[in-house]
Amino acid sequence: MKECRKCGLEKALPEFSIRRSAKDGLMSICRKCNAAKTKAYAQANREKVKAYSAIWRSENKEKTSKYQRDRRINNLDEAREKDRVRYRDNRESVRARQKEYYQRNRGYLLGCAAAYRRENAKSCKENMAAYYIKNRERLRGGHRKYYLANKDKFLGYSRARAAARSPGFLRARAIDTAKRRAKIKRAIPAWFDAAECAKLYEIAGCITRETGIKHEVDHIVPINSEVVCGLHWHGNMRVISKADNASKGNRHWPDMP
């Protein structure tokens, strides 16, 4: 047992911090009193302590980083909750610091992200697909908003690509278009109703104009597929978004075996 010179209480030896220069190798005041003394000094000399701490951290970067990393790993849930609270209470300043850090270390961060994606390609792809499905409408709205704000730039890209297309590409595209027209012609049944089909194309145009999202007429059972051959009539047609039509492909249809 040892008596604390600050509070006057007798306490067990583990309650005192080590001081090698003392005769018994321990401080004269207990840990609790020492902590209160240190806190009071720090509050009274805030700028001085802050400057000293900054110098010490700069001179002991590896030691400080390892300590902080180990402490975070050992208290991960607590650290994440503190991060959430700090971000919620200081959103603007935190985002400003993050942006500044990213701009200062952009090349390094992009390299790390690319390396991680290469090493974890499968899990990254699965996570991106799950995130897109969960936030589909919000992401599409954001994409549409960005497109409208930068429409001239996107149109410029399209015109540049069109101008750069070779005569061979244009010939191949014309051949593919002719083949599709021929397949549609062969897939038209006797009960084909041109008026009903025209209504579907009109509906697609109206939805596109009202929502700003491109809609198209899709063949439910594909007519241009190596797997199946559908028919070109209004019973096998529907109006869906261009993105859904592009992702559907020509190998899938409802109730397929």
Image: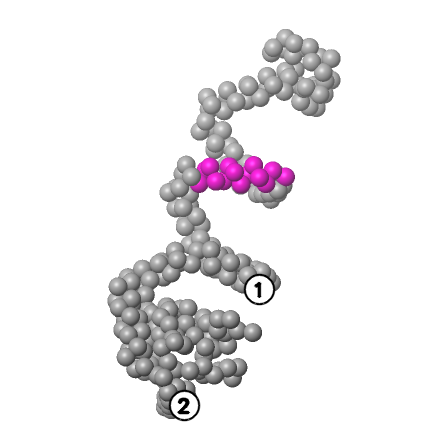
Q: Earlier in the sequence, mark 2 or mark 1?
A: 1
Location of residue 122 (image quadrant): bottom right
Q: Is residue 106 left or right of residue 118?
A: left
Residues under labels 2 and 1: Cα distance?
A: 43 Å
- Residue position for label 2: 186
Range shown magenta: 74-87
Quadrant (top left, top right, bottom left, bottom right) of the C terminus: bottom right
Instruction: Please tell me how crowded label 2 is: few (under 14), some (14-19), or many (20+) other residues with Cα within 10 Å.
Output: few
Which residue does the image show at 48% across and 57% down from the upper left? Answer: 131
- Residue position for label 1: 121
15 shown above or below 110: above
Mark 1: amino acid: Ala
Q: Which mark is residue 147?
A: none
Answer yes or no: is residue 43 visible. yes
Residue 76 in magenta stretch: yes
User: Residue 87: x and y, percent?
Assistant: 44, 40
Which residue does the image show at 29% across and 70% down from the upper left? Answer: 203
Mark 2: amino acid: Arg
Q: Secondary structure at mark 1?
A: helix
Which residue does the image show at 44% across and 55% down from the upper left? Answer: 135
Quadrant (top left, top right, bottom left, bottom right) of the N terminus: top right
Q: Secondary structure at mark 2?
A: helix
